[in-house]
Amino acid sequence: MKILSEITGGTWLFKIDAPEQLKTLVNTVLAGGRINEETPELSTFLGEKQFDESTGETKLINKVAYIPMVGTMTKYSGMCINGADRICAEAMKAQNDPDCIGTIFHIDGYGGNGDAIPLFQDIAPKLTKPRINLIDKALSAHYWVAILLGQYNMLSNDLTAEVGSVGAQYSWEKSTNEIIIVRPPESQEKNQDFIDALAGDYSALEKKLSPLAKKFQSSVMESRPGVKIEHLQGATYYADEAIKFKLADSVGTINDAYKWLLAKSEIQKLKSK
C-alpha cells in the first residue's frame, strides 16, 4: 500500500524519454502484482580473504560494502523492491560496521520518487567512511542520490554509462474527455494550477516546480565544485562530457572502485593520526 500511495501522491523525478519503466511499475502495482519475483539481495561485502590460524577460519579483510540501487527509485520498500528506506538502513549498517572500511554504491536508474531524497539527505552527514558511486545510469533522482551519498563518481564504461537529467517537470496525458470541476465558494483556489494548465496556462505549475529544480541544482554544485549551471538544466551526458563538465570523475570497473576505497581509507587513517 505504501508503493501505491507513492504512485498516486509522489513527486517523481524521472528521465521522461524512458517512461516505460515507470509505466510498468504503475500497471503492475495497480493490478496487485509484484515488481520482482523476489526482493533482490540488497547488499554484500567485498574484500580479501585471509586465513586466521588462531581460529582456523577464513575471514574477510579490507572489507567494503556493495549496495546496488538499480531500477525505479521508491521511498518505501515493498512489492519485492528495495526502497530508499532499506537502502539508507544498509548504508548506515556499513557505516557502523567496525570491519567495513567503505561503501560502493552501484547506481543504475532513470530516476524515481523525489520524496525519497530527504531520507538520503538525512543520512548523508552521518556517512564518514569512504564512499564511491559506480554508475551505469544515474539520471534525475538517481543522480541527486549519487551526489548525496558518494564522494566520487566512477562511470562503469565509456560507451553507455550516463549521468544528468538534473531538473524537474510535470507530465501528464491530455484527456480526450471533458473534465468537469466543481468547487464551492470556500475552495476557489483548490487545484487552480491544474485548472489553469488545462486551459493552456502553465505559469503556476512552472512556479511550483522552480524551487525543487533550484534545490537540485544547488545540491549538485555544492557537492561537485566546478560544475556550471548550464550543465544542470536537464541534459544527460555520456562519459567524456560528464567528466569534462565535472559531473563525473573517471571510468572504471568494480575492481577500480574497490582500489579507490582502499586508497581513500589509508589516506583517512593517516590524517586521523
Image (tube, grey):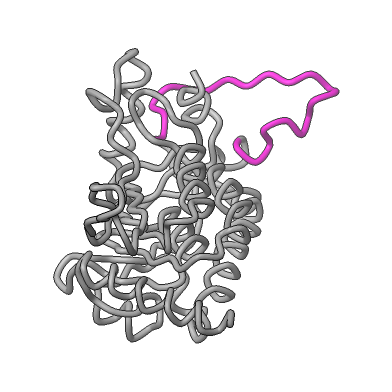
Query: Residue at the spot x=25%, y=27% of the render?
Result: 36
Tell me: residue 240, above or below residue 130: below
Residue at the right extreme of this rendering: 186
Tell which of 238 and 268 is nearer to you.
Answer: 268
Residue 83, image x, y percentages: 44, 37
Seen at 63% across and 51% down, the residue is: 122
In the displayed structure image, the side of residue 96 where residue 71 appears, left or right: left
Residue 180 in magenta? Answer: yes
Q: What percent of the width, then of the height, locates residue 143? A: 42, 60
Residue 190 left/right relative to 93: right
In which quadrant is the C terminus drawn? bottom right
Q: Front-most of 273 and 249?
A: 273
Q: Which residues are magenta?
A: 173-194
User: Height in image: 28 above or below 194?
Assistant: above
What secondary structure prevails in the magenta region?
loop
Q: Is residue 124 left or right of residue 57?
A: right
Q: Is residue 253 magenta?
A: no
Residue 172, above or below 48: above
Q: Quadrant of residue 72?
A: top left
For residue 191, above or below residue 208: above
Residue at the farthest top position: 32
Q: Position of residue 47 (x, y in %)?
A: 27, 59
Say which quarter of the image contains residue 215: bottom right
133 or 73, which is in the foreground? 133
Percent from the top left, x then y, of residue 262? 35, 73
Q: Residue at x 51, y 30 (%)?
A: 6
Mark count:
0
Q: In the displayed image of the protein, which residue is found farthest to the front?
A: 54
Question: What residue do we see at 39% from left, 49% from top?
Answer: 111
